[in-house]
Image (cartoon, helix red, strand yellow):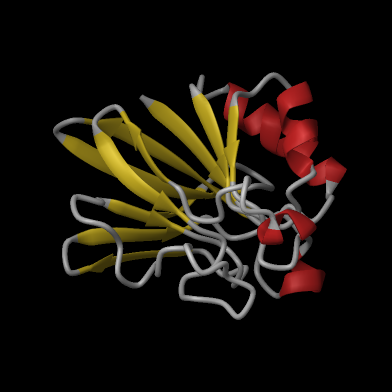
Amino acid sequence: MVVGVVSDTHGNREGMALLAERLKAFEIEVLLHLGDDYQDVAVLEEAGFKVLAVPGAFCPEYAQPQVPNRPVVKLKGVKMLLSHTPQRHKADLPEDPDPEAPPPDVRLVLYGHTHIPALENRQGILWVNPGHLKTRHEMGYPSTFAILRLSPRGVSVEIRRLEDGEVVMSS
C-alpha cells in the first residue's frame, strides 16, 4: 500500500496543486494530512484523494472532541499514530494520547508542526515529519512531503522535495 503524508499546508493552494500532481504519479491509496490547516483537506479531496486528517493545534477543530486529535490508524497491517505535534501541547484535550508514549504495537508516529522534515527511529518506532508546503523563504526549509510504502512485513519511507520530487531522506 502506498500512502502520501503531508503537513502544514497552511492554505497554500499552489503547493497543494503541485502536491496532487506529484502524488498521482505514486498512485497512492490514501493521503494523511497532519494539520495546519484542517480546512485544506477539502482542497485535497477535490483533487481526488481519500484523506485522513488531524487538526493543527491552533485550528478550531482541535478543541472539538468529535474530531480526533491523535488517532491510531491501521493501514495494511501497520499501526500508526497521527499527530500534529511531536509532544503534548497546551491545547490538548484531556483524552488526547501523549505522542511521546505511543500505544502498544504502534510502528510509526507521524507528526508535523515543526515544519522540519525528519525521519528518526526511536526505540523501534519510526518517527516521520513530512515537513511543510510553505515556500522556503517563509519557513527556512524547502517544501516536502512523504511517501510511505506499507506491508505487514515492512515499512519504507521517502521524504521528497515538492519542487522536483527528489528524495531528500529515506528509510
Q: Which residue is painted at 73% across and 32% down in the image?
A: 44
Coordinates of residue 133 in the picture (x, y in percent): 71, 54
The part of the image, by quadrant, that contains residue 137 is: bottom right
> For this view, does 166 lie left or right of residue 108?
right
Coordinates of residue 141 in the picture (x, y in percent): 65, 69
Q: Which residue is painted at 85% across and 42% down in the image?
A: 14
Out of 10 and 163, give the one closest to the viewer: 10
Coordinates of residue 33 in the picture (x, y in percent): 60, 45
> For this view, does 46 lie left or right of residue 72?
right
> For this view, does 161 lie left or right of residue 111?
right
Out of 49 and 72, give the one closest to the viewer: 72
Q: Which residue is painted at 66% across and 66% down in the image?
A: 57
Residue 148 lies, with reference to residue 29, above or below; the image says: below
Q: Which image quarter holds the N terminus?
A: top left
Please give the count of numbered marks on the rendered protein.
Answer: 0
In this rendering, does residue 97 appear at all?
yes
Coordinates of residue 94 in the picture (x, y in percent): 51, 69
In this rendering, does residue 171 appear at all?
no
The part of the image, by quadrant, that contains residue 77 is: top left
Out of 102 and 48, give the one closest to the viewer: 102
Residue ranking furthest to the bottom: 90
